[in-house]
Image: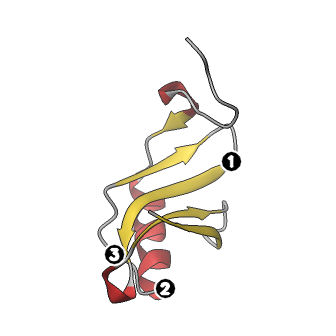
Amino acid sequence: MSIYAGQANSSDYRALTPEEKSRLTDALLKQGCRNPKAMKFDVETNLFEAEDAVCEGGRKYDIYLDRNFRIVSMKPD
C-alpha cells in the first residue's frame, strides 16, 4: 500500500459545527457558488473544504477557505 504526499486520511477531517456550516455556505454564495457535495474541516491544513461546489456557469470546484472563511484556493473538479 502506498500513500501519496498530500493524501489525507478520513481522520484528518472533522465535521462542521452548525455555525461553521452557515458561515461557509454564506461565503460560497457570495462567490456565486452553491450545493457542495461535502463540507468539512481539514485539521492538518487548517482549512475548510467545500467539495464539488457548483459555481457560475455550472462548473464544479473544490474550494478551500481559511478560518476566517476567506477563499484561499479554487480547483476545478
Locate residue 21, reporting x and y percent: 41, 60
Could you tell me how far apart the alpha carbons at marks 3 and 2 are, in whole angstroms?
Answer: 9 Å
SS label for mark 3: loop
Q: Is residue 24 left or right of residue 71?
A: left
**Sequence-first tag of 1 and 3:** 3
What secondary structure is found at the residue carrying circle 2? Answer: loop
Q: Quadrant of the C terminus?
A: bottom left
Q: Real-space Cα distance between discs 1 and 3? A: 22 Å
The amino acid type found where label 3 is placed reads Arg
The residue depicted at 47 percent of the width and 67 percent of the height is 24
Label number found at residue 34: 3
Q: Decide: is 27 above or below 30.
A: above
How many other residues sit within 10 Å of disc 3, few (<14), some (14-19) or many (≥20)?
A: many
* Mark 1 vs 3: CB contact within 8 A: no
Q: Quadrant of residue 69?
A: bottom right
Task: Tell which of 37 and 23 is nearer to you.
Answer: 37
Q: Which residue is mark 1?
A: 46
**Viewed as shown, does residue 68 lie left or right of 15?**
right
Using the image, tell me which numbered label, if any, was put on residue 31: 2
What distance separates the C-alpha of mark 2 from that of mark 1?
Answer: 21 Å
The colour scheme is: secondary structure
- Crowdedness of circle 1 by 10 Å Cα count: few (<14), some, many (20+)? some
* x and y percentages locating residue 14 in the rendered image: 49, 37
- Quadrant position of residue 39: bottom left
At 31% from the left and 56% from the top, the residue drawn is 37
Q: Is residue 6 above or below residue 39?
A: above
N-term mark: 2 or 1: 2
Determine whether label 3 and label 2 are within 8 Å by CB. no
Question: Can you say which quadrant of the picture contains the N terminus?
Answer: top right
